[in-house]
Image: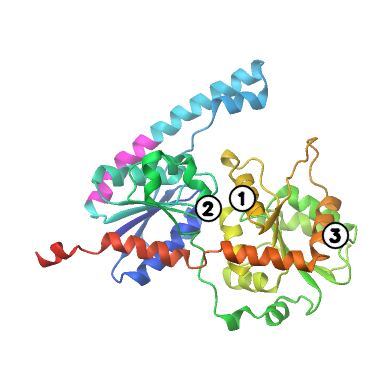
């Protein structure tokens, strides 16, 4: 039984699709996931190692012409930006039409039983083809604000799974009755014995006592957050009771190491990236996270009951990271710290570290944030979404009888 999964461009869209696929194969033996992704994006690098069949297409996202014009002003540069965005959108729509034409006979031949899309423009062709073939389409939205592709495909989706209940308001009216608040499909938590704080700190080389601050900028790293962290470590802000574990992102690791070449490493450790098993150790060891506000990262923090300072990426599509951070701040699980203040000045190390210290000096507040995070968490989301999809795949009693 072939089930199509599509979502990508970034880890935040691709990893939910992967996690749901893995959960579904455990829920319904005999299911064969088939992935549809985009050339040149994260799925092209990760799919070969998963062992699933897949197809990569050439697709592109739509741009906002008026947004491009506003970014350049009303003069000649603004008009040029508007024209450039419009031309890019014509190309994107052509690529979408071509991708649908190529994918339609493929999925018809494979007799796809369902199409599961997890957002991003990458998933639009598969969702449209699913509609054309009349097979069930399932949508999973990770963010507080539903993306453009989710809003389109939700119109005919049989199931719509959201991580933030607030996302429902942004969907077309008729689709809202098909929404389920399932949470984000993160990987299953390890058993309790694998979540021991002291053992995790020992495995990471962090001190047994004091506070551990986990700093992570998303799968690609975060340049401006990294600059603030370099200022913090160069100025020796962490004291003897604080230890920083900083994930720089692979692209930024060499530059960060060079900037800190002469700084003693007793109060911090820097790594480019952590594989899932090592990331579990970091989440178990930490008392506080400093992070971008990507949907999957924040869902991990909730599942682990880890309080967070969230610094959203201002350029994220439709401001979804800012919306995520605000929603979790309102829930009491995180602090929203904008990258730019009201005057447009960028986040500096001193400002970031003063917020870290404010929370570390208030253990009661940290405990309340941790409790709020766990209340909002959906650690079994991947399994729950897979179980719901399985209900679409199982034959009805009348079908079985016939």
Dividing the picture into quadrants, the one containing residue 276 is bottom right
Residue 272 position within the rendered picture, expressed as x and y whole percent measured from the top left: 68, 61
Q: Nearer the viewer, mark 2 or mark 3?
A: 2
Quick check: can you spot residue 306? no
Instruction: Left or right? Give the position of 394 relative to 5.
Output: left
- Residue at disc 1, secondary structure: helix
Q: Nearer the viewer, mark 3 or mark 1?
A: 1
- Residue at disc 2, secondary structure: loop
Dividing the picture into quadrants, the one containing residue 365 is bottom right
Quick check: can you spot residue 132? yes
Q: CA distance from mark 2 to mark 3?
A: 35 Å
In this picture, which residue range is highlighted in magenta? 96-108
Labels 2 and 1 touching (C-beta < 8 A): yes
**Circle 2 sits on which residue?**
164
**Circle 1 sits on which residue?**
327
Residue 100 is covered by the magenta coloring: yes
Residue 329 position within the rendered picture, expressed as x and y whole percent measured from the top left: 67, 53
User: Within 10 angstroms of label 1, few (less than 14), some, or many (20 or more) residues?
Assistant: some
Dot 3 or dot 1: first in sequence order is 3
Question: Which residue in the rendered view is the most extreme toward the top?
Answer: 75
Query: Can you tell which mark lies on residue 233?
Result: 3
Dot 2 or dot 1: first in sequence order is 2
- Residue at disc 3, secondary structure: helix
Instruction: Give the main secondary structure of the magenta stretch.
Output: helix
């Amino acid at each position: 039984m072939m089930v199509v999964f599509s979502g990508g461009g970034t880890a935040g869209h691709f990893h939910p699709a992967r996690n749901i696929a893995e959960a579904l194969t455990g829920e319904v033996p005999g299911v064969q996931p088939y992935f549809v992704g985009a050339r040149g994006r994260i799925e092209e690098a990760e799919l070969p190692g998963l062992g699933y069949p897949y197809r990569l297409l050439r697709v592109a996202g739509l741009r906002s012409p008026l947004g491009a014009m506003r970014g350049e002003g009303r003069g000649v540069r603004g008009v040029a930006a508007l024209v450039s965005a419009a031309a890019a959108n014509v190309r994107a729509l052509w690529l979408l039409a071509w991708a649908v034409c190529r994918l339609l006979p493929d999925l018809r031949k494979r007799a796809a039983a369902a199409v599961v899309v997890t957002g991003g423009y990458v998933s639009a062709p598969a969702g449209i083809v699913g509609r054309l073939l009349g097979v069930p389409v399932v949508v999973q939205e990770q963010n507080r604000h539903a993306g453009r592709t989710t809003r389109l495909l939700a119109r005919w989706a049989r199931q719509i799974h959201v991580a933030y209940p607030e996302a429902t308001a942004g969907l077309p009216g008729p689709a809202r009755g098909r929404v389920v608040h399932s949470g984000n499909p993160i990987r299953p938590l390890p058993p309790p014995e694998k979540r021991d704080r002291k053992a995790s700190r020992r495995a990471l080389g962090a001190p047994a006592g004091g506070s551990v601050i986990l700093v992570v900028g998303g799968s690609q790293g975060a340049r401006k957050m990294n600059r603030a962290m370099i200022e913090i470590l160069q100025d020796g802000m962490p004291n003897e009771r604080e230890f920083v574990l900083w994930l720089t992102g692979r692209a930024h690791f060499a530059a960060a190491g060079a900037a800190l070449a002469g700084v003693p490493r007793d109060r911090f450790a820097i790594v480019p990236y952590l594989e899932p098993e090592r990331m579990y150790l970091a989440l178990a060891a930490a008392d506080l996270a400093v992070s971008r506000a990507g949907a999957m990262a924040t869902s991990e923090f909730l599942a682990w009951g880890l309080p967070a300072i969230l610094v959203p990426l201002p350029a994220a599509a439709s401001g979804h990271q800012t919306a995520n951070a605000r929603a979790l701040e309102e829930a009491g699980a995180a602090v929203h710290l904008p990258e730019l203040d009201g005057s447009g000045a960028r986040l500096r190390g001193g400002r970031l570290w003063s917020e870290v210290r404010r929370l570390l000096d208030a253990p009661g507040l940290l405990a309340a944030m941790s409790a709020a995070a766990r209340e909002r968490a959906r650690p079994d989301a991947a399994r729950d979404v897979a179980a719901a999809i399985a209900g679409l795949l199982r034959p009805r009693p009348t079908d079985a009888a016939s």
